[in-house]
Amino acid sequence: MITIMFTRPKHWSLVSAVIKWISDSPVSHVAIGTDLHGVPIVLGADAQGIHPVTRTRFLAESEVVEEYATTKVDLEPGFKRAIEHMGEKYDFAGLLGFGLVKLAWRWLRVKVRNPWTSPRAMWCSEFVLHLDEQHLIAAWSKFQPEATDVEFLRRACEGSDDFRKLVPPV
C-alpha cells in the first residue's frame, strides 16, 4: 500500500514553524509511505533532497498527523515515476519564492508567480504530486506541483472521496 503522510517535526524547527505559519497548517511536511521488501519506508523531499528512509527512523524525528490511502486510483505507476526523482535536490529557493507568493496573496491580495522555482529540484508537496502525473485523482487534478503547498494537499485529501484517512496512521 502507498500512503500520503502529513507530518510535523517532534522538536521545534524554524523552517517547519515558518511553513506552518505561511500555509496556515498544522503540518509542515508531506511524504510518501510504502514498504520495500517488507520494510516500511518513507520517501520524501527534505533538506537532504529526495531520498528514502525507514519509517522507524523517520518517526524518531517526525509525528504523523494524518495519513491517507487512495480509494479509487492505484498509485503504483505514479510511484514508479516518483522514485525516478530520488537524488534530486531540495528546492530551497523555490520554497522561499513560494513563501513570497503566499504572503503577497495573504497581505496584498496580489497573485504573483514564484520567481525562483527550479526545474531540477523540488519541495515535499511538489514531489508527492508526482504520484499523479496523469491527473487521475480528481481532488488533485487542478494542482500544479510547483504551486501547491502542504496544506492545499492535506485539505484536498481530507475533503475527498478519492482518499481514505487511516486512523491511527499506519
Image: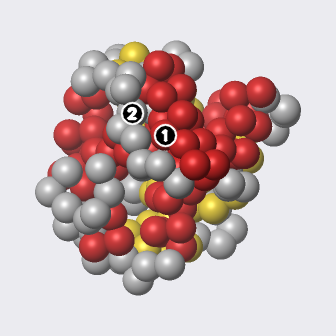
Quadrant of the image occupied by residue 114: top left
**Residue 28, quarter of the rendered image:** top right
Find numbered disc 2 in the image and state the secondary structure of the residue it sits on: loop
Q: Position of residue 79 (x, y in %)?
A: 28, 46
Query: What residue sits right under mark 1 in the picture?
Result: 101
Position of 86 relative to 80 (above/below): above
Residue 7 coordinates in the image, percent (x, y): 65, 48
Measured from the top left, where is residue 127 in percent x and y? 37, 39
Q: Nearer the viewer, residue 134 or 105?
A: 105
In the picture, the disc for residue 141 is none
Kind of residue indicated by mark 1: Val
Other residues around mark 2 within 10 Å, as few (<14) / some (14–19) / many (≥20) = some
Q: Which residue lies under the disc numbered 2? A: 114
Q: Where's residue 14, x and y in %?
A: 77, 27
Amino acid type indicated by mark 2: Asn
Mark earlier in primary sequence (1, 2): 1
The residue shown at (40%, 56%) is 2
Q: Is 169 placed above or below 29 here?
A: below
127 or 44, which lies in front?
127
Residue drawn at x 47%, y 69% is 157
1 is higher (above) or lower (below) than 165: above
Left or right of 19, for residue 86: left
Q: Report the residue at 28% width, 63% height from top.
A: 142
Q: Is residue 27 above or below residue 95?
A: below
Q: Quadrant of the N terminus?
A: bottom left
Q: Give the quarter of the image for residue 91.
A: top left
Considering the image in quadrants, where does the C terminus appear? bottom right
Residue 85 is left or right of residue 20, and the answer is left
In this rendering, position of residue 141 left or right of residue 33: left
Residue 62 visible in image: no
**Which residue is the extreme one toward the right?**
12
Are the residues tagged 1 and 2 within 8 Å (C-beta)? yes
